[in-house]
Image (cartoon, rainbow, N blue to C red):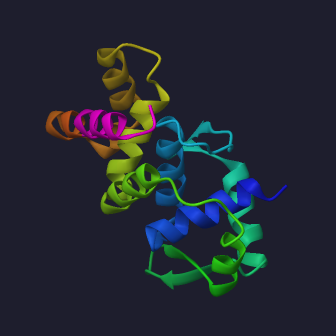
Amino acid sequence: MLEGHAKIVQFITLAGEVTGRKKLQKMVYIAKKMNFPFQEKYQFHMYGPYSEELTLRVEELCNMAFLSEKMEDKGSYVQYTYACTEEGRQFLSTMENTNMKLDQCIERLNEKSSRFLEMVSTLLYFDHIERLAQVEKLHVIKGKLKFSEKEVEEAFAFIDELQTAGVN
């Protein structure tokens, strides 16, 4: 019953901490697209792929004290940072061992900015269409972010790197 919750606690534990709700959404989505077993359903939203299920799961995990949520006022916005608590670590002790490839994937994802992960997740959301069409969609949908050609190439290289190292 709580397997999906445990996977999110494990994800955040492996990351150490995740700064930003948007970043967490993108990291889990990208890991799911790399065939790691996350169950959350995603829809396209203002900042790219978004899962209401993930939002609710994280809220529940914070309420159960398995995750901590630190809120920091940044003036024009509030930034949230998530980490695993001692109760969360005890909860995880009932799970199977970590997939080392997932650990490596999460480490790579957490190194990247939310902006970069927003671009990568948007490209992956449209991975069923050819690459040129993906780029065109990206520029139409995310035009305000003004992604350069170099950034887009870096995003595709990052996706290739994750796919090569991932579960695929």
**Residue 72, x across and y down, in percent:** 50, 83
**Residue 13, x across and y down, in percent:** 53, 71
Residue pictured at 32% horizontal, 45% vertical: 145
Q: In which quarter of the view is residue 54 placed?
A: bottom right
**Residue 44, x across and y down, in percent:** 58, 36
Q: Is residue 48 visible from the viewing direction of this image?
A: no
Farthest front residue in view: 97
Q: Looking at the picture, does residue 80 appear above or below residue 128?
A: below
Helix, strand or loop for the magenta stretch, by majority: helix
Is 62 in front, or is 73? 62
Q: Viewed as shown, does residue 122 lie left or right of 25? A: left
Any magenta on residue 90? no
Which quadrant holds the N terminus?
Answer: bottom right
What span is in magenta? 155-168
Farthest top residue in view: 130
Q: Viewed as shown, does residue 99 lie left or right of 149? A: right
Which quadrant holds the C terminus?
Answer: top left
Q: Is residue 111 visible from the viewing direction of this image?
A: yes
Q: Viewed as shown, does residue 26 lie left or right of 159? A: right
Q: Looking at the picture, does residue 134 appear above or below residue 15?
A: above
Is 60 in front, or is 99? 99
Q: Viewed as shown, does residue 118 lie left or right of 42? A: left
Farthest left residue in view: 150
**Residue 23, x across and y down, in percent:** 46, 58
Q: Looking at the picture, does residue 135 appear above or below residue 132?
A: below
Q: In which quarter of the view is residue 108 placed?
A: bottom left
Residue pictured at 49% horizontal, 73% vertical: 77
